[in-house]
Image: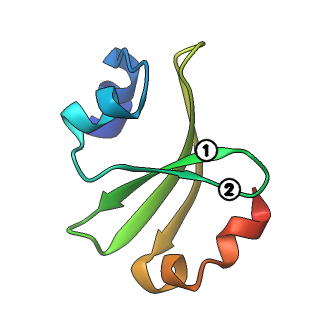
Amino acid sequence: MGIWDVVVAEAEWRNILDVRLEYPPADGIRLESGMVITVFNVRGNEYRLLTHIDYANQLVHALDLLTHAEYDKAQWKGRY
């Protein structure tokens, strides 16, 4: 089990503000579909981990891991 798995398993996040207490640069992005994606910077901003956090059920779904360049193209927004 990696560090991320431990953090997520122990987390009791109720909203993006709670997430930012542990990961200050985390961003919540509302897509046209209405879905909110929470984005985490990984490896010194080299990658972006896209997640959907179901706060009510305390579940974090990892959706995608993109390079910074792939993320900036924003093509991922149409997938969710």
Within 10 Å of disc 2 (Cα), the crowding (few <14, some 14-19, many 20+) is: few
Numbered disc 1: secondary structure: strand
Label disc, if present, on residue 31 of the rendered structure = 2
Label 1 or label 2, whichever comes before in sequence order: 2
| Contact (Cβ within 8 Å) of mark 1 with mark 2 | yes
Which residue is rendered at x = 57% and y = 48% of the image?
37
Residue 28 sits above or below residue 60 on the image: below
Image quadrant of residue 21? top left
Which three-letter amino acid code belongs to the residue tagged 2? Leu
Q: Between marks 1 and 2, how big is the CA–CA gap?
A: 6 Å
Of the 4 image quadrants, the one containing the C terminus is: bottom right
Compared across the picture, whether 32 is left or right of 42 comes to right
Which residue is rendered at x = 68% and y = 56% of the image?
31
Q: Nearer the viewer, residue 47 or 80?
A: 80
Label disc, if present, on residue 65 of the rendered structure = none
Which residue is rendered at x = 74% and y = 46% of the image?
34
Q: Which residue is mark 1?
A: 36
Which three-letter amino acid code belongs to the residue tagged 1? Val
Q: Indicate the position of residue 65 as horizontal and vertical percent values.
A: 51, 63
Which residue is rendered at x = 77% and y = 68% of the image?
78
Compared across the picture, whether 52 is left or right of 66 comes to right
